[in-house]
Image (cartoon, grey):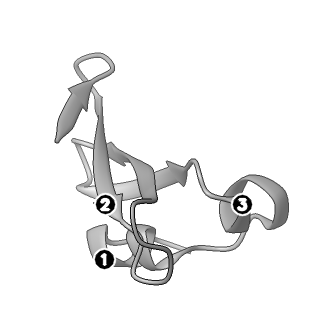
Amino acid sequence: MVLELDDRYETIMIESKVREGVFHKVVKDLETGRAVSCSCKCWSKGNKTCVGMRSVGFDN
């Protein structure tokens, strides 16, 4: 499922591999094709990339 934010970003829903029924909402930059943020605790609390972000691609 893809939700449009504006012309530059899109949100991609990626199912968690650890918790069934839980989804990561990964925000992807359309210009670079890389993930810029995620709704999960790893990113929002610790600023660490999650599996969902790494599956899309992430620049350090």
Residue type at tag 1: Ser
Q: Which amino acid does label 3 sit on?
A: Lys
Which dot, 1 or 3, sits closer to the camera? Answer: 3
Q: Residue 1: x percent and y percent? A: 16, 42
Callout 3 secondary element: helix
The vertical placement of 23 against 42, above or below, is above
**CA separation, marks 1 and 3?**
17 Å
Q: Are marks 1 and 3 in contact (CB under 8 Å)?
A: no
Where 44 sits versus 42, above or below?
A: above
- Read off the residue under disc 2: 14
The residue singled out by tag 1 in the image is 55
- 18 over 1 or under it: above or below: below
Residue matched to label 3: 41
Determine the CA span between mark 2 and mark 1.
9 Å
Q: Decide which of tag 1 and tag 3 comes sooner along the chain.
A: 3
Label 2 sits on a secondary structure element that is strand
| Residue contact between numbered discs 3 and 2, judged by CB atoms under 8 Å | no
Q: What residue lies at 82% left-to-right and 67% top-to-bottom?
A: 46
Q: Residue at x 54, y 75 (%)?
A: 50
33 or 20, which lies in front? Answer: 20
